[in-house]
Amino acid sequence: GAVVSQHPSWVICKSGTSVKIECRSLDFQATTMFWYRQFPKQSLMLMATSNEGSKATYEQGVEKDKFLINHASLTLSTLTVTSAHPEDSSFYICSASKVINTGELFFGEGSRLTVL
Amino acid sequence: KQEVTQIPAALSVPEGENLVLNCSFTDSAIYNLQWFRQDPGKGLTSLLLIQSSQREQTSGRLNASLDKSSGRSTLYIAASQPGDSATYLCAVRQGGSEKLVFGKGTKLTVNP
């Protein structure tokens, strides 16, 4: 199988606080993980590409200091939303590709962030 | 810049009907194309992956075709069931990149 797990599945926080979302590949090793953001009735927008042991590559327009990404191992990447504001409220989804790359990407269940 | 379009945006059919979802992309230099299913408030479930050298892939009642030269893919669902109700997303991966470019999806409702 190829299971990607995200935690938490939903989180509510106060404006100004930081929130960490974890993305784990449960039964495979992932050299590369991707973080997406999805607004209601919109498609997924790639935020950043995370490679194990190196700095993440951010897409144009994504603030790297606000969305901190760490890929410390072949099975775990984290996204930290720092000093969250209501406009950061969204659905965040991660995906991972296997070390032995078949070209297929596997997605987590998503994390719903609501900033009050 | 690759752009992916899915038509229709929404589709409602009676149970048992066969249906086709469409996906088009502007840059034919793709590595592969993937169809996903997304239930409300959930992540993405991979349905079918078609490599650029392939013409179609089948899984159960699902069949996906790819015409790279014309920039089109279709997802055929046979004998639709209420449990098929979901949003179906098409995504393409460019050659030399691991990034996926997504369409906005087709929201399918199968009425019992």
Image (cartoon, coloured by chain):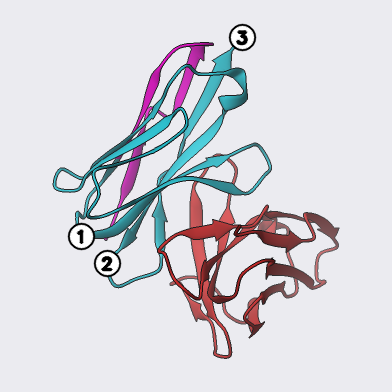
Chain colours: A red, B cyan
Q: Earlier in the sequence, mark 2 or mark 1?
A: 1
For the residue carrying disc 3, how many other residues have a C-alpha within 10 Å: few (<14), some (14-19), or many (20+)?
few
B24, above or below B100, in the image:
above
Q: Earlier in the sequence, mark 1 or mark 3?
A: 1
Q: Earlier in the sequence, mark 3 or mark 2?
A: 2
Identify the residue at image location x=32%, y=56%: B32
Residue under label 1, please give it. Answer: B29
Which quarter of the figure is the C terminus of chain B placed in? top right
| Chain letter of the residue carrying label 1 | B
Residue B112, numbered circle: 3
Most distant residue in the left direction = B69
A52, above or below B49, in the image:
below
Q: Are marks 3 and 2 on the same chain?
A: yes
Residue under label 2, please give it. Answer: B95
State the CA–CA distance, disc 1 to disc 3. Answer: 40 Å
Label 1 residue SS: loop
